[in-house]
Image: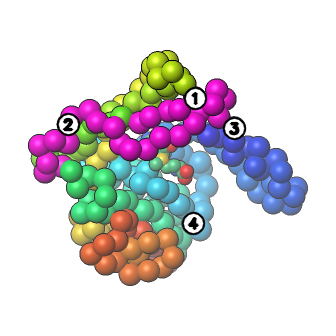
Amino acid sequence: MLCVAQEKVDALPSNIREKIRLIESDMCNINFGEQFGLIIMTFNSFSYLLTLAEQKNVLEKVLLHLQKGGRLVFDILNPEQGRYTDRHSGTASFLKLSGREWKNPNTGNRVVEWFSRSYNLVDQVMHEIQIWEEVAIDNTSLTRYYRDRQQRYSFRYEVEHLLANIGFNLEAVYGDFSFGPVTPTSTQFVFVARKES
Ligand SMILES: C[S@@+](CC[C@H](N)C(=O)[O-])C[C@H]1O[C@@H](n2cnc3c(N)ncnc32)[C@H](O)[C@@H]1O
């Protein structure tokens, strides 16, 4: 992903390019030795922090990296909409076709997606297995790419309490990326949290 990002950076005018640094790092260990006015953690990345200790550690480090009055903006999926809503269903753990399929751009073959999910409802952790299976024109199965991941789903007010506990002031919670309000059908929550000025 960083290679693709670097190609996009290389195509920018030099006055913008020189302001951008791409750094590969575990968010649990960030230590840049400087502070920023804005930190963004996008597209449910927060859900990869599987324990309260990991969540607190990252948020404390983010606070240290923010200037006074600086903002942290991040989003999580609403656990009551979309992914994670199958957590109370006994069928969630069966391996099944997701219905998504596409063409491998390199080979032109069809790729079909399989997945299964299992949940630890006490720890709010989902374990998902995804299999991308490449199928030849004669329907022979050619290759299976396998992905195994865990995510912790969080509820809105759980995150609000956590942010307050770490020392953030919550400026806003949106239900989408266009500053829309949180509604019962919002698929995500977007938090804007500020460091005291
Ligand atoms: C849903 S993707 C978000 C995609 C990406 N952030 C973007 O803006 O396109 C979540 C990303 O978080 C990354 N991630 C998971 N745990 C991480 C960690 N401890 N430190 C840094 N990144 C992590 C995953 O590798 C994945 O790329």
N-terminal of the two: label 4 or label 2?
4
Ligand 1 contact, mark 1 (Cβ < 8 Å)? no
Q: Position of residue 116 (x, y in %)?
A: 27, 36
Q: Height in image: 155 above or below 95?
A: below
Q: Amino acid at mark 3?
A: Cys
**Residue under label 3:** 3
Q: Position of residue 75 (x, y in %)?
A: 42, 62
Q: Amino acid at mark 4?
A: Leu
> Magenta region: which residues?
87-113
Q: Using the rendered image of the protein, determine whether residue 54 is visible from the camera's viewpoint.
A: no
N-terminal of the two: label 4 or label 1?
4
Q: Using the rendered image of the protein, determine whether residue 28 is visible from the camera's viewpoint.
A: yes
Q: Secondary structure at mark 4?
A: strand
Residues packed near mark 4 inside 10 Å, few (<14), some (14 to 19) or many (20 plus): some
**Residue under label 4:** 38
**Residue under label 1:** 109
Q: Secondary structure at mark 2?
A: loop
39 left or right of 44?
right
Q: Nearer the viewer, mark 3 or mark 2?
A: 2
136 left or right of 117?
right
